[in-house]
């Protein structure tokens, strides 16, 4: 059954959301099931609040597209990011300028309690970075379909 006030899909691709209040924005986005936030130029505060709320585990969000730069993902605390990402079923962060520490934290958080089915992290790390995470990658692949 559909919950009161739930929205299936919002595509904010290329919409500048940087002027919206971080808490209001984050709370609003939690009501959506599928979200495209490419090129939205979120501020550090907005993107941090977003993953904070997501990590709380009360959101409807299942699919998140946040590929390409322009969403300030690299500024988010790696534990907050990893916790939030693992509450999703499908997450795409292609060439999102994620740091090595963030990618590592996301992979470390993938386990039997993770909701993730598909995770796309391509284009964030150079080959050597990916190579050094091979064991974590292998472990994460037991739980979800992973693209590095």
Image (cartoon, grey):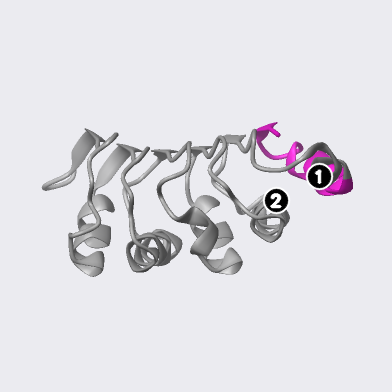
Which of discs 2 and 1 lies nearer the camera? The answer is 2
Examine the image and state in which quarter residue 49 appears.
bottom left
* Circles 2 and 1: CB atoms closer than 8 Å: yes
The quarter in which the N terminus is drawn is top left
Question: Does residue 101 show up?
Answer: yes
Q: Residue at x 42, y 60 (%)?
A: 51
Query: Which residue is labeled 2 in the image?
Result: 107
Q: Residue at x 48, y 37 (%)?
A: 68
Q: Residue at x 79, y 42 (%)?
A: 137
In front of the other: 49 or 83 = 49
**Are there few (<14), some (14-19), or many (20+) residues within 10 Å of tag 1?**
some
Query: Which residue is labeled 1 in the image?
Result: 139
Does 77 lie within the magenta span? no
Q: Secondary structure at mark 2?
A: helix
Label 2 vs label 1: CA separation?
A: 8 Å
Which residue range is magenta in the image? Answer: 132-148
Question: Does residue 1 show up?
Answer: no
Examine the image and state in which quarter residue 65 appears.
top left
Does 142 lie within the magenta span? yes
- Left-right relation of 96 to 28: right
In front of the other: 120 or 46 = 46
Q: Residue at x 47, y 36 (%)?
A: 67
Labels 2 and 1: the sequence-earlier one: 2
The quarter in which the C terminus is drawn is top right
In front of the other: 125 or 53 = 125
In the rendered image, residue 57, in percent from the top left (x then y), is placed at 41, 60
- Left-right relation of 118 to 29: right
What label sits on residue 124 in the rendered view? none
In the rendered image, residue 142, in percent from the top left (x then y), is placed at 76, 38
In the rendered image, residue 78, in percent from the top left (x then y), is placed at 60, 64
């Amino acid at each position: 059954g559909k919950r009161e006030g739930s929205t299936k899909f919002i595509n904010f691709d290329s919409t500048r959301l940087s002027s919206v209040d971080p808490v209001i924005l984050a709370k609003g986005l939690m009501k959506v099931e599928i979200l495209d936030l490419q090129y939205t130029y979120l501020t550090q505060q907005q993107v941090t609040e977003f993953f904070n709320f997501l990590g709380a585990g009360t959101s409807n969000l299942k699919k998140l597209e946040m590929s390409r730069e322009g969403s300030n993902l690299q500024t988010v605390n790696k534990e907050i990011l990893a916790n939030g990402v693992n509450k999703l079923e499908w997450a795409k962060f292609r060439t999102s300028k994620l740091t090595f520490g963030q990618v590592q934290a996301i992979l470390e958080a993938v386990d039997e309690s993770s909701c993730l089915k598909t995770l796309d992290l391509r284009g964030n790390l150079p080959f050597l970075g990916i190579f050094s995470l091979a064991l974590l990658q292998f472990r994460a692949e037991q739980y979800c379909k992973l693209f590095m």
